[in-house]
Amino acid sequence: MQIAENTVVSFDYTLRNNDGETLDTSEGREPLTYLHGHGNIIPGLEKAMTGRDEGDSFSVTVPPEDAYGQHREELVQNVPRSAFQGVEQLEPGMQFQAESNAGPMVVTVKEVGDDEVTVDGNHVLAGQELQFEVEVKTVRGASDEEIEHGHVHDGSTHE
């Protein structure tokens, strides 16, 4: 069965940046499983998966605009340190959920000053070209319930 809209796909992958550094991999874990055509993985990878068959292996380079977007400088902001009340040890690299005009978002602490903290609302992979090595493990038709809910069900009860 070919990968198309409303198919459930399981695949192994290794994700690297342009320097060849491994950013993520399914090695040693279960394959990643998703419902194709429902935006459950980044658009560039989903597009590259379309039409592939069980057992196919391939490499694909996904540009930022088809992954996590370009780095947006307006998402880097200074906020008062008082916004982090209750956090005793504030350090660069820490991540927090914040409310924005567009709804909840994850921000990463970049710098910690005496009165201000610089946070970055960009995804950590924004602005990066991503290199994927993929092996398609299984492809099956999705159930009506999976299609209705827009994601794969693992067999447990779900509402």
Image (spheres, helix red, strand yellow):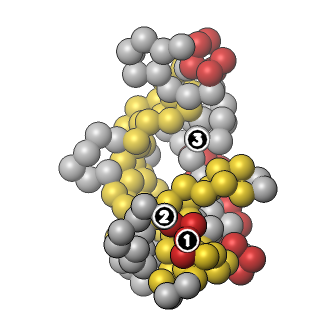
Residue type at mark 3: give it: Asn
Q: Residue 118: which numbered mark, if any? A: none
Crowd class of label 3 (few under 14; some 14 to 19; many from 20; radius 10 Å): some
- Graded by Cα atoms within 10 Å as few (under 14), some (14 to 19) or many (20 or more), the crowding at tag 2 reads few
Judged from the image, the secondary structure of the residue bearing numbered disc 3 is: loop
Question: Which image quadrant is residue 24 in?
Answer: bottom left
Residue 118 at what x, y percent from top left?
A: 57, 80
Tell me: residue 30, above or below residue 5: below
How many callouts does the rendering have? 3
- Per the model, the C-alpha gap separating discs 2 and 1 is 5 Å
Residue 69 appears at what percent x and percent y? 68, 67
Please identify, in this view, whether the residue under mark 3 or under mark 2 is nearer the observer. Answer: 2
Residue bearing mark 3 = 40
* Image quarter of the C terminus: top right
Disc 2 + disc 1, Cβ < 8 Å: yes
Foreground: disc 3 or disc 1: 1
Label 1 belongs to which residue? Answer: 82
Q: Position of residue 82 (x, y in %)?
A: 55, 71
Instruction: Kindly state the secondary structure of the residue where label 2 is placed.
Output: loop
The residue positioned 71% from the left and 49% from the top of the image is 103
Q: Residue at x 54, y 55 (%)?
A: 97
Nearer-the-camera pick, 55 or 83: 83
- Number of the label disc, if any, that sits on residue 85: 2
Say whether residue 44 is visible: no
Disc 3 and disc 1: Cα gap in Å? 36 Å
**Which tag, 3 or 1, sits closer to the chain's start?**
3
Of 155 and 52, nearer the camera is 155
